[in-house]
Image (cartoon, helix red, strand yellow):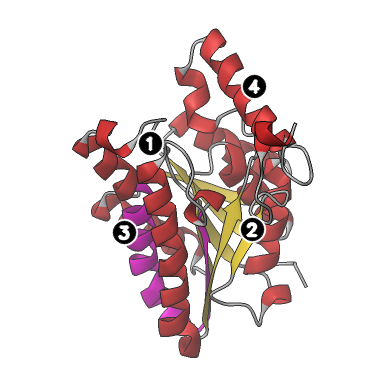
Amino acid sequence: MTRIDHKTAIVTGAGNGIGRAMALAFASAGANVVVSDVLVDDGERTVREITEAGGHALFVAADVSDAQQAENLISSAVDHFGSLDILANNAGIGGGRLRLHEVEPDDFDRVINVNLRGTYLCSKYALPHFLAQRDGRILNTASTYGLIGAPNAPAYCASKGAIINLTRQLAVDYGHDGVRVNAICPGYIDTHLGRRGPQLTPEEFEAATAIREKAAGMQPLGRQGQPEEVANVALFLVSDAASFMTGSIVTVDGGCVTTFNYGEASN
């Protein structure tokens, strides 16, 4: 039931981390995968991993916050593979660790543009193809930070909260057209800090990793998740195994939003 043979799937932000794991999982389940990222070398590496394992993949560089590039991404997938069946809106960025009054307007806009506008644009250009065939699956990557208030992350929390409710709204509008729209909310996932990692000094990287590991250790399962654990849920949601699911917001977070965590106060 979780096979997606002969389907064509786009995964944005697929050069690293959760997006890369999704692309590999979709390909291993039989899909043709269009890998998209702004990081060309990383995206092409993901394509090589898929093709070397016997799968079919295409890399399309795209900044999903740009309408023309988002439209080109969708049309490139259809032109190359002949159809489009699955869109995984995974591309996203963080906003630094700042309180709202410390965030510059341009920096706030950039987070909203990539995370939320990118989800809107890719969905906008994919939906006509789904409507024409009366079938399609959209999977949005939100975050536990879209479900709760988190410290020093105003732009990120705002963007991910908006993605969650956009997911529900799209499910309402397009369910009768055979289009299912769901979202996943990862918690602490060991992605080596994703795009932030290469930008940090070794000392900053070590400190940031320690913070994440400590925070993850206080969650019910007591550890960070692996990208593949998120990708397994993503594959389920875009497959026929989840045929009666739409508008669902699925946490993959080791239980972190299920409990009020006292942290240091509980020691």
Label 4 with label 2: CB-CB less than 8 Å: no
Tag 2: residue type? Thr
Sequence-earlier tag: 4 or 2: 4
**Which residue corresponds to the image point at 60% horizontal and 38% vertical from the top-left?**
17
**Which residue corresponds to the image point at 31% horizontal and 55% vertical from the top-left?**
117
Q: Locate residue 10, reporting x and y percent.
A: 51, 57
Alpha carbon distance from label 4 to label 2: 23 Å
Alpha carbon distance from label 3 to label 4: 40 Å
Alpha carbon distance from label 3 to label 2: 29 Å
Span shown in magenta: 114-142
Q: Based on the displayed image, in which of its 4 quarters is residue 70 positioned?
A: bottom left
Badge 2: residue crowd in 10 Å (few <14, some 14–19, many ≥20): many
Can you identify the residue that label 1 sits on?
95
Q: Locate residue 71, reporting x and y percent.
A: 31, 59
Alpha carbon distance from label 4 to label 1: 19 Å
Front disc: 1 or 3: 1
Image quarter where the N terminus lies is bottom right
Alpha carbon distance from label 2 to label 1: 21 Å
Tag 3: residue type? Glu
**Which residue corresponds to the image point at 47% horizontal and 74% vertical from the top-left?**
168
Can you identify the residue that label 2 sits on?
251
Q: Locate residue 240, reporting x and y percent.
A: 69, 76
Tag 4: residue type? Ala
Can you identify the residue that label 3 sits on?
71
